[in-house]
Structures are given as structure tokens and as C-alpha cells.
Image (spheres, grey):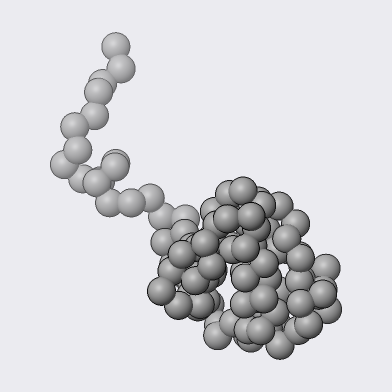
Amino acid sequence: MTLLEIIARPGSRADSVNWDPWRKRWVFSCRAEAVDGEANAALIRICAEHLGLPQADVRLQRGSRSRVKVLAVRQLSLDEIVRRLGGRPRVPETTDSEPEGRTGPGRATRKSR
């Protein structure tokens, strides 16, 4: 079982799934309002449709009353989920070098006494 952390946007104009590079999470938008679990049911349906799975293979693990939710997906690895949702942009790799300006040339340093 693979856990997928998402951001829910109930009450949207259309049902959709988009990658948010700032939050580094998928955003699931649905037309259903967040009333009596309608939006949660719609999110499970949308996820199952986009992944090509039956709804029984997707369930809400955590976050039933929160915008940040964790969905449990059976039968698929995270790589396969990313492929089926349209791919996720690569996050640039960080380097070990220190950013310019912190200790760069011309910066005043305090002398020890």
C-alpha cells in the first residue's frame, strides 16, 4: 500500500489533479462541497479515475477534516502513481556549496579579542 499526501480543494469549478511545485504535493480539486464527507468521496473517486483503479483500491488514511489528506493506494508503487498522474517535475538537486553573500568576499567579520 502506497501513501500519497495531497492538498484538497473542495468547491472548485472542475474536478482536476495538478502538481504544486511550491508545496511539492498533488492538488486534487473537486466540485463537491466539504459537507458530510461529499468532498472526501469525490477525492477518492477522482484519484481512482486518474490512476485507473477501482474506488475500493483508494481510501482516505488521514485528514478527513483537513485540506492536507493522506490517501492509501493499493496495487501501485509511488513511481507508477507519479507516471499515471502525469509526471512530477524534478526537484533541482542542492549543492554543498554555501550561498554567496553569507561568508563571501567583502563581508565584515568580527575579530576575536
* Front-most of residues 4 and 32: 32
Image location (x, y in percent) of residue 91: 48, 69
Judge whether residue 45 can be spotted in this image: yes
Q: Which image quarter: residue 80?
A: bottom right
Tally of numbered discs: 0
Question: 1 and 32: which one is in front?
Answer: 32
Q: Position of residue 108 (x, y in %)?
A: 19, 32
Residue visible at 75% across and 57% down? 61
Q: Is 76 positioned to the left or the right of 63 in the image?
A: right
Quadrant assignment for the C terminus? top left
Q: Farthest residue in the front direction? A: 36
What is the residue that sits farthest to the top in this orientation?
113
Residue 29 x/y as whole percent = 50, 70
Q: Is residue 66 above or below residue 55?
A: above
- Residue 32 found in image quarter: bottom right
Q: Is residue 109 left or right of residue 98?
A: left
Residue under the image location 29 percent in, 42 percent down: 102
Which of the pair 38/29 is nearer the observer?
38
Percent across and percent down for residue 109 are 24, 29
Q: Is residue 62 left or right of residue 109?
A: right
Looking at the rendering, in which quadrant would you find the N terminus?
A: bottom right
Name above or below for residue 2 compared with residue 53. Answer: above
Which residue is drawn at the image coordinates 64% and 55% (left, top)? 36
Q: Residue sitting at 76 percent across and 71 percent down? A: 58
Residue 89 in sight: no
